[in-house]
Image (tube, rainbow, N blue to C red):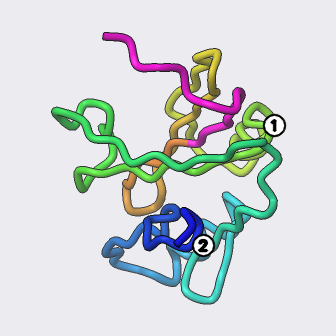
Amino acid sequence: MSEQDKPRVTGLGGVFYVAKDTAATREWYRDMLGIDGPYGPQLAWSEEPKKNPYSLISQFADDQYIKPGKGGFMINLRVHDLDGFVDQLKSKGVDVLDTADEGYAKFAWILDPNDIKIELWEQVIDELPPEES
């Protein structure tokens, strides 16, 4: 059996959480972030321009990185042209909490209508650098 045929995890399948008004939440994601789908925002990898696109599941020792979001988790969304996307969000009245350029990636943070923190991420290099010890 080849590596390609072996049972394995192939990527992030979705993020699921409880919202008081699911219709309004889906509308916000459609109108503010431009993502929509029959069951909520749906993302396609086929549009990704990077050579080696990746998703990351990361853990934190406390919730400082998640704040001011609620619920103990954050959604990270890949974006193309983060600077232009941030300008677009601001023009729609979305409060951008902060931005950062880490060299390997660019980031911006916002809250959705349920106070779930969203990290917007533009992958700048093909692979993450090794973690410093």
Magenta segment includes 106: no
Quarter of the picture containing the C terminus is: top left
The answer to whether residue 92 is above or below residue 113 is above
Q: Nearer the viewer, residue 14 or 96?
A: 14
Magenta segment includes 132: yes
Q: Is residue 43 left or right of residue 132?
A: right
Q: Which residues are magenta?
A: 120-133
Q: Which residue is mark 2?
A: 41
- Residue at the far top in the pictured view: 133
Q: Which residue is mark 1?
A: 84
Q: Is residue 111 left or right of residue 36?
A: left
Q: Nearer the viewer, residue 116 or 48?
A: 48
The answer to whether residue 52 is above or below residue 130 is below
The answer to whether residue 78 is above or below residue 97 is below
Location of residue 116 by image quarter: bottom left
Q: Nearer the viewer, mark 1 or mark 2?
A: 2
**Residue shown at 47%/20% (left/top)?**
130
Amino acid at circle 1: Gly
**Residue shown at 60%/73% (left/top)?**
41
**Residue shown at 77%/42% (left/top)?**
50
Amino acid at circle 2: Pro
- Residue at the far left in the pictured view: 61
Q: Nearer the viewer, residue 79 or 109?
A: 79
Q: Are marks 1 and 2 in contact (CB under 8 Å)?
A: no
Nearer the N terminus, badge 1 or badge 2?
Answer: 2
Q: Is residue 3 left or right of residue 85?
A: left
Image location (x, y in percent) of residue 79: 70, 46
Image location (x, y in percent) of residue 12: 49, 63
